[in-house]
Image: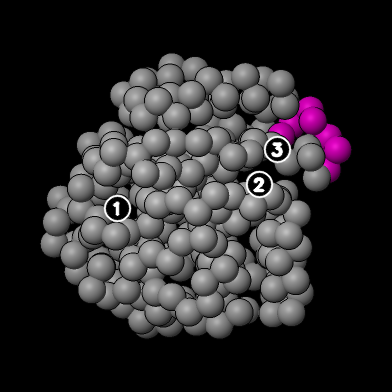
Amino acid sequence: MIRPPAVAGLFYPSSPDELANMVDSFLAKVPNYPKRDYVAAIVPHAGYVYSGPIAAHVYKALSTLRPRHIVIAGPNHTGYGAAVSVWPKGAWETPLGQVPIDEDAVAFVLDRSSFALADYDAHHYEHSVEVQLPFLQRIYGEFSFVPVTMMYQAPDAAEDLANALPLETLFIASSDFSHYVPADVGREKDLAAIQYILDLDVDGFYRFVRENDVSACGIGPIMTAMEYAKRLGARAELLAFGNSGDATGDYSNVVDYAAIVFYR
């Protein structure tokens, strides 16, 4: 089954040339990063005019890598489909072309996960995985991937998914951080939450976001990245942090974005 883009023309340009030029301009404006064995990343998924400059930091770093498998997990904003949903076969389409599903990696994940199910419904209208693809298309050209959405975002699901990933997987957690808060409030909460991420403290992170009402939407994918990094003996680094006010000039009510990488 071919999945057409759901948010082309909304979150990012529908014109191939305009989209490629936008992504390339974001990448050109961020520094070069060392060539490392990157195993996972946390990347925002808002409209490109808002979060693209932050996301570009991760993708500039990942451009030095050529992973065997790519798994992209995002939150389920729509409420459709399975609690942990994997699109099983076919390809996803963006204005830059089709990206095939890594069906061998899908089979590996589904065989080893107690939560993940093959499911299309969760993905048709969900943007959190889709918006990562044009960046990957610009840095890698042709590649295949595994799309995952998580409606159930608890530590047990994160640990389960992390342990179900194939060897030589680059895991991308798609998540924004605090939503619709004053910039100073969001920054204080989110940088405190991010410190737990940098420390690979999954329980501390989960407890902090719940007790402090941190409205990060993709805590399941984030915790999966942390668990996967722990499994591989990786460390974490915050590359960039910003918010939607950097684009609009209005810092009274913002969404926060972070670019974080995990590497060995």
What span is in magenta? 248-254
C-alpha separation, residue under disc 2 versus residue under disc 1: 27 Å
Image side of residue 147 versus residue 21, left or right: left
Mark 2 residue crowding within 10 angstroms, few (<14) / some (14–19) / many (20+): many
Spot occupied by residue 111 in the image (x, y as percentages of width and height): 13, 62
For the residues bearing labels 2 and 1, Cβ distance under 8 angstroms:
no
> Which one is nearer the viewer's eye here, 91 or 196?
196
Residue 54 image label: 2
Does the magenta portion include 39?
Answer: no
C-alpha separation, residue under disc 1 versus residue under disc 3: 28 Å
Which residue is pictured at 40% across the width and 25% down the height?
A: 199
| Residue of label 3 | 243
C-alpha separation, residue under disc 3 versus residue under disc 2: 9 Å
- The colour scheme used here is one colour
Three-letter amino acid code of the residue under disc 1: Val
Tag 1's secondary structure? strand
Tag 2's secondary structure? helix
Magenta stretch prevailing secondary structure: loop
Three-letter amino acid code of the residue under disc 2: Ile
> Which of the marked residues, 2 or 1, is nearer the chain's N terminus?
2
| Residue of label 1 | 84
